[in-house]
Image (spheres, rainbow, N blue to C red):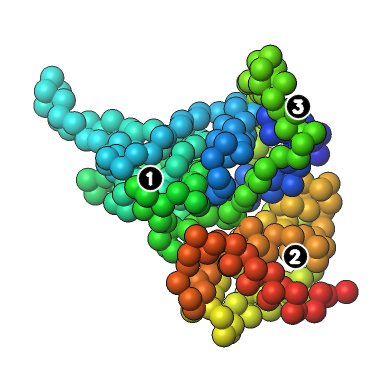
Amino acid sequence: MFLKINALRKNLATVLIGKDEAIRLSIAALLTKGHLLIEDVPGVGKTTLAHGIAMSINCAFHRIQFTSDMLPSDVIGVTVYNQSANSFDFKPGPIFANIILADEINRTSPKTQSAFLEAMNEKQISVEKITYTLPEPFMVFATQNPMEYEGTFPLPESQLDRFTMRLRIGYPGEIDERVIILSKSKDGPLAKPEPVLSIKELIELQKHVDKVRMDEDLVSYILAIVTATRNSDHLRLGVSPRGAINLYKSAQALAFVEERDYCIPDDIKLLAVPVLAHRIIPLQDLTDTGTTQTDSLIEEIVDGISIPL
């Protein structure tokens, strides 16, 4: 089990240099059967990380480059008339894959963004009163630029809540950036990672994550954090029950990535911002630093709660 996880980590380390924490957390999100939102400035490796994970798994993968003129049918598919059979046939869209890279998801309209809601929550879509089941496993890796708002449509709270985590990658250090520049200039190992996981192996790993032990004290710790967000004087929207469940599952997954069969308080503390910060709304309107503000509020809340011993 752990050999496969380590192989995936090493694979991604050749794609995203010097960002071990982002890699660990993205693998944890993958193992929760959830979805990942990668939010950062252009050029730091958002698409590279998502593409690297998809290419590391031997499965069906589609990349969707979102634009303002895209329609829901461009994502989920369309029903067309088959003249020879005198019937209407459904032509599946790119959402029918195991791994979806939704690149710059906030560049498309809310109507098209909403095409993902049912898919992300229920792993199915409905077209013309007919329900189609999506492949198993199914995961959305979405990217967005938090700094450029012109021509974008911010994701609504209902959609943000469906992402298990929101990650930032950040700029690389000087030594790592030197490696990146030289590797890119020589078309080195950053080009194309080989698959190290099959669909069957990924599903087995996800099943093992569900068996990771979570003590009752840690469940109480999660509930204390979630309740504090709902009672905070600085927030008008606290964390939903879905957020609490995702924090629980993410802690199990992170423990598994770290080769443990039990959770510790540090798992929850580390994951509080990635799992919860995008689910809260401060009392004051968000500005260009809005996402940083929610990070700080979650950190304050977590720091104010006693860690179970």
Res 59 → quadrant = top right
Mark 3 to mark 1: distance in Å? 32 Å
Q: For the residue labelled by badge 3, is the local secondary structure a helix, a strand or a loop? A: helix
Circle 1 packing at 10 Å, graded few (<14), some (14-19), many (20+), is many
Residue at image location 66% in from the left, 21% down from the top: 184
Regarding residue 85, the answer to whether it shows in the image is: yes
Q: Nearer the viewer, residue 200 or 102?
A: 102
Q: Residue furthest right?
A: 309
Q: Secondary structure at mark 2?
A: helix
Spot occupied by residue 31 in the image (x, y as percentages of width and height): 65, 46
Residue at 58% of width from left, 67% of height from top? 294
Above or below, 46 against 293 in this view is above
Q: Mark 1 belongs to which amino acid?
A: Arg
| Quadrant containing the C terminus in the rendered view | bottom right
- Residue 208 appears in the picture as rendered: no
Identify which residue, 210 or 11, lies in the foreground.
Answer: 11
Label whose residue precedes the other's in the sequence (2 or 3): 3
Image mark for residue 291: none
Q: Which residue is mark 1?
A: 107
Between tags 3 and 1, which lies in front?
Answer: 3
Q: Position of residue 43 (x, y in %)?
A: 57, 36
Look at label 2 and name its amino acid: Lys
> Which mark sits nearer the N-terminus, 1 or 2?
1
Q: Quadrant of residue 193?
A: top right
Judge depth for marks 2 and 3 and give the one in front.
3
Which residue is label 3 attached to?
A: 179
- Please indicate whether residue 88 sits to the left or right of residue 255 in the image: left
Position in image of residue 93 (x %, y %): 34, 33
Under tag 1, what secondary structure? helix
Which residue is located at x 72 percent, y 32 percent?
A: 177
Q: Amino acid at mark 3?
A: Val
